[in-house]
Image (cartoon, rainbow, N blue to C red):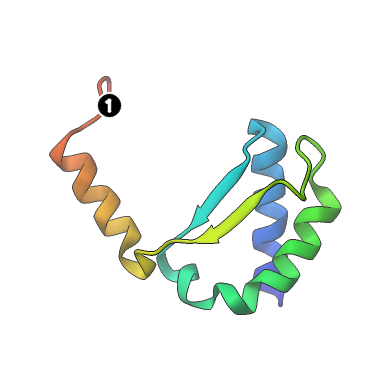
Amino acid sequence: HLAGRALGLGLSDIFNLLGLEAVVIGGGAAPVMEFLMPELLKEFTSRVFAVDPRRVRITRSELGPDAPLVGAAALFESPAEGV
């Protein structure tokens, strides 16, 4: 439960700073999202103010734990300008 709360706290800070509407959780957290979500959402909705928490989408990556590797490979294939 502590991991879900910590993730909810971190995400609320990011959403408050950037005003995002969605986030996709990947990597090692993806397989355990069903266990993290109750505490994550509780913490997130109590702390986010820059966006309406009812409109926010927090989803698990379909790539699962391989998401960071796929992202790194995509960046290697076509690096962003100025990086």
- Which of 63 and 82 lies nearest the eye of the viewer? 63
Q: Is residue 39 left or right of residue 74?
A: right
x then y, percent, for residue 67: 34, 59
Quadrant where the C terminus is found in the figure: top left
| Residue occupying the point 79% across, 45% down | 48
Q: Position of residue 30 (x, y in %)?
A: 47, 69
> Up-down: is 6 above or below 78?
below
Instruction: From this view, report whether residue 45 is shown above or below residue 20.
Output: below
SS category of the residue bearing label 1: loop
Label total for image: 1
In x, y percent, where is residue 64?
A: 38, 68
| Residue positioned most to the left | 77
Which residue carries the number 1 mark?
A: 83
The residue lying at 75 percent from left, 38 percent from top is 51
Answer left or right for 5 relative to 46. left
The kind of residue on which mark 1 rests is Val
Q: Quadrant of the N terminus?
A: bottom right
